[in-house]
């Protein structure tokens, strides 16, 4: 089972798409004004690191 | 929306708009889809462009020009500042645009040329036939449409997914994304004819901070830092807030702009059967300045021209579209990207001491042209000790 997950803080995200470009799995998508994450996410944390606002967090359960 | 076009353009930024306009003007049937409800917003740009680059595409219009820039200031990590004034030698500098109006104008022109345009319309998958792109699934207002096209232009910007869905890896290495934050601010005590660039590992590690005036004491005050320098407590916005608290404590913020700029090498191939990739989606912004408006317009137009020739010849295979790829790589823009990538690799590793010594040396140069190439060549002459540091660059200069 996948024990980690990527949490998108919609209240912080400014839907800029920077994270989408660095995701090695193509798991993120920017749908106009909101961001989605698909199952392909491997919780590598790259997107979390580069977000200009800090809207992403890999949560370990 | 029809079911079949000569060309389908995914994305309504400067790249997509120029591809569509160019092809539609020559009579191709063109459809452009943009996922946002309004072209050009939210802005993800500092809006600076060199004058001679712009006039290559359309005559300047006060409608979308915020300010006419005459000089630039470069501030070293130690606070030493110097002015670059190519305008004194009669050379043109640049404009700060109003991208909301500019981008809209470009799509407008594409529409006038005959492009069918759809907003709040998102490409969600390519249509693949025999392993090649043959169109796209478009979602708009809760409905799905299958749009077939002889050629698809992926002009979907930094967040591009289209080429990836079609099998091309477009991932930007995270060290090579400039993570950016910017405020449009007002009430600033600034020179409205001067752009300012701040350098330094404390101020903007592996990037720079900019103040681009927009007239009447307003400016885009923004920053880009290297992706590997970003993390909790030291993100682009943290650096920017710190700078503003110190430098413009009385400025008022009227807009927050964020985004990513790729400073990696361009995609290894920007063509596939029935598809061309343009602008930010092709990862072709300038690795030093991060500028990509011109590059998007240039590749968009070139893709449009290539599409016309390919459709006329009845061959839209990868081979037939290859002239698009080889032409932009051999162009002045392509060469500049290659050179500036090499320069960036050296510059992002310099410590503040070296950066200081560079800015001090530049201040002694009488610069008549505003380009990274002339700047570097002069720099090598003025600061021979730098030669050692930059020796790998000799071949590219
Ligand atoms: C903070 C910042 C500052 C910058 N400053 C400058 C500067 O001063 N000067 C400069 O020259 N450049 C600058 N740039 C870069 C410049 O903004 C881009 O290079 C330029 O916008 C690229 O144009 P484009 O047409 O390729 O992509 P974009 O302008 O990004 O357009 C792509 C469009 O495609 C749409 N789209 C994406 N996916 C889909 C889909 N699936 N379906 C439909 N539509 C889709 C998007 O909504 C978007 O409108 C800056 C960038 C940033 C982030
Ligand atoms: S990089 Fe951050 S702000 Fe930008 S879309 Fe991704 S999560 Fe949102
Ligand atoms: S954690 Fe890694 S795999 Fe998951 S969305 Fe972010 S970048 Fe992609």
Image: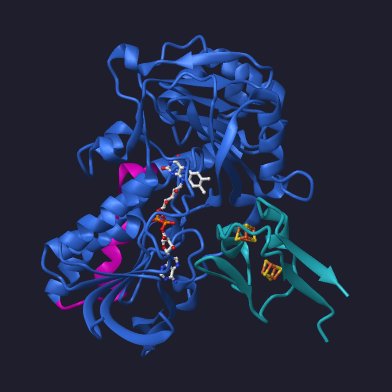
Chain colours: A cyan, B blue
Q: Is residue B97 visible?
A: yes
Where residue B370 appears, as percent x and y from the top left, is 39, 25
State the image quarter where residue B3 is shown.
bottom left
Which residue is depicted at the point 44% across and 56% down?
B280
Which residue is depicted at the point 31% across and 13% down?
B89
Determine whether B62 is above or below B113 in the image: above
Q: From the viewer's perspective, is B88 left or right of B263?
A: left
Where residue B101 appears, as percent x and y from the top left, is 33, 47
Which residue is depicted at the point 44% across and 42% down?
B291
Q: Main secondary structure of the magenta part?
A: helix
Q: Is residue B328 visible?
A: no
Q: Is residue B319 a member of the stretch shown in magenta?
A: yes
State the residue in front, A11 or A36.
A11
Where residue B223 appears, as percent x and y from the top left, is 60, 38
Query: What stretch of residues is rendered in magenta?
Result: B314-335
| The C terminus of chain B: image quadrant | top left
Q: From the viewer's perspective, is B337 left or right of B53?
A: right
Q: Is residue B13 a member of the stretch shown in magenta?
A: no
Ligand 2 position by quadrant: bottom right
């Amino acid at each position: 089972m996948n024990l980690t997950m990527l949490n998108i803080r919609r209240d912080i995200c400014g839907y800029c798409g920077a994270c989408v470009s660095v995701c090695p799995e193509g798991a993120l998508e920017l749908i106009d004004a909101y961001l989605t994450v698909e199952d392909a996410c491997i919780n590598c944390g790259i997107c979390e690191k580069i977000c200009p606002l800090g809207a992403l967090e890999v949560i370990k359960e | 929306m029809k079911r079949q076009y000569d060309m389908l353009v995914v994305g309504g930024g400067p790249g997509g708009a120029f591809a569509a306009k160019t092809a539609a003007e020559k009579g191709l049937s063109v459809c452009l889809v943009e996922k946002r409800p309004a072209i050009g917003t939210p802005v993800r740009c500092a809006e600076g462009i060199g004058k001679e680059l712009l006039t290559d595409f359309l005559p300047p219009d006060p409608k979308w020009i915020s300010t006419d820039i005459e000089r630039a200031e470069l501030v070293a990590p130690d606070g030493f500042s110097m002015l670059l004034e190519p305008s004194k030698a009669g050379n043109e500098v640049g404009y700060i645009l109003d991208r909301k109006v500019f981008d809209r104008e470009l799509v407008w022109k594409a529409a006038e040329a005959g492009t069918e345009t759809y907003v709040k319309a998102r490409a969600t998958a390519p249509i693949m036939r025999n392993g090649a792109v043959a169109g796209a699934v478009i979602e708009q207002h809760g409905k799905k449409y299958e749009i077939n096209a002889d050629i698809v232009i992926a002009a979907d910007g930094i967040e591009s997914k289209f080429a990836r869905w079609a099998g091309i890896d477009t991932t930007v290495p995270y060290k090579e994304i400039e993570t950016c934050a910017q405020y449009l601010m007002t009430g600033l005590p600034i020179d409205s004819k001067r752009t300012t660039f701040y350098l330094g590992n404390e101020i903007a590690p592996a990037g720079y901070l900019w103040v681009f005036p927009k007239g009447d004491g307003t400016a885009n005050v923004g920053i880009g830092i290297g992706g590997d320098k970003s993390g909790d407590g030291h993100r682009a916005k943290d650096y920017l807030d710190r700078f503003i608290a110190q430098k413009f404590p009385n400025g008022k913020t009227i807009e927050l702009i964020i985004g990513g700029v790729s400073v990696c090498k361009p995609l290894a191939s920007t063509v596939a059967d029935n598809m061309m990739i343009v602008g930010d989606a092709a990862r072709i912004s300038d690795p030093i300045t991060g500028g990509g408006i011109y590059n998007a317009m240039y590749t968009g137009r070139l893709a449009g021209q290539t599409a016309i020739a390919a459709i006329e010849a009845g061959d839209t295979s990868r081979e037939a579209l290859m002239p698009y790829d080889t032409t932009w790589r051999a162009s002045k823009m392509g060469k500049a990207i290659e050179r500036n990538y090499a320069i960036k690799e050296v510059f992002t590793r310099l410590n503040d001491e070296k950066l200081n010594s560079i800015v001090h040396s530049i201040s002694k140069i009488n610069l008549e042209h505003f380009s990274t190439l002339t700047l570097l060549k002069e720099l090598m002459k003025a600061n021979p000790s730098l030669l050692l540091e930059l020796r790998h660059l000799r071949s590219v200069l």
